[in-house]
Amino acid sequence: MDSLAERLDAVRERMVRAGGDPARTSIVAVTKGQPRDVVAAARAAGLVDLGENYAQELTAKARHAEGVRWHMLGHVQRNKVKALAPVVDVWQSVDRPELVRALAAHRPGASILVQVNVTEDEGRNGCDWEDAPVLVEQAAAVGLDVRGLMAVGPRHDPADAFRRLVALADELGLPERSIGMSDDLEIAVAEGSTMVRVGTALFGPRPDRLDLRR
């Protein structure tokens, strides 16, 4: 089995082949569903930005990690914001006004990305296209640091959706475009991603059961 360093090199090579520059497109290593020791392995490989989808996993792993910039990637319930506020550095899934208000109350000045639902695939989170500019404006008005937009691409043919998201970010003057994961990062990079969220390509399949005590 390849080492994490080798898999990280392979991800960077994929980005280069897609026309991207790994120095300009950051990698968020998604540790969702992985045991706690992958955090130390990621740091040893030089990865600083780590992401989680669930509040419990993020807070459990953050207690045992230093030098990590944690990204909250999944849907955030408003009642979880207070507990997450001390450990989350970038909130990538801000998708509604009540979450904006909760962040302003518990993490003033937080760095956020507004998540846009770019697909009709069932079960996707994010605000509607037409609501994104308003949400960006509301977040900025209460002092949050709106860095960009985030989206999970459609399962099929994501290029058009990614292109539209990049165009919207340009229109709003936002520098970050968090698009692309293990299966579609080449398409995202080619369309202008500045941040890819990679889990399986770095850490392999998630185990069937996760014990956060170890």
Image (spheres, rainbow, N blue to C red):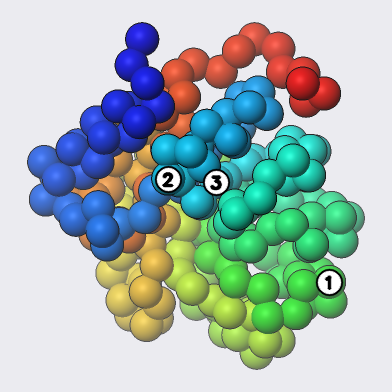
Residue 94 in view in this figure: no
Residue 22, image x, y percentages: 25, 52
Residue to which mark 1 is pinned = 106
Q: Nearer the viewer, mark 2 or mark 1?
A: 2
- In-front residue for pair 186/1: 1
**What label sits on residue 134 in the rendered view?**
none
- In-front residue for pair 6/209: 6
Residue to which mark 2 is pinned = 46
Residue 19 in view in this figure: yes
At 62% across and 41% down in the image, what residue appears? 52
**What label sits on residue 50 in the rendered view?**
3
As measured in the structure, the alpha-carbon distance from the residue carrying label 3 to the one carrying label 1 is 22 Å
In the image, residue 39 sits, relative to residue 79, either above or below, namely above
Q: Type of residue at label 1?
A: His
Rendered-image quadrant of the C terminus: top right
SS label for mark 2: loop
At 31% across and 51% down in the image, what residue appears? 161
Residue 31, image x, y percentages: 57, 34
23 displayed left or right of 146: left
In the image, residue 4 sits, relative to residue 143, either above or below, namely above
Give the quadrant of residue 208.
top right
Of mark 2 and mark 1, the one earlier in the sequence is 2
Q: Judge the density around disc 2: few (<14), some (14-19), many (≥20) Cα neighbours within 10 Å.
A: few
Of mark 3 and mark 1, the one earlier in the sequence is 3
111 displayed left or right of 182: right
Q: Type of residue at label 3?
A: Leu
- In-front residue for pair 140/9: 9
Residue 98, image x, y percentages: 78, 68
Q: Please report contact status of discs 2 and 3: CB closer than 8 Å, yes or no.
A: no
Give the quadrant of residue 79.
bottom right
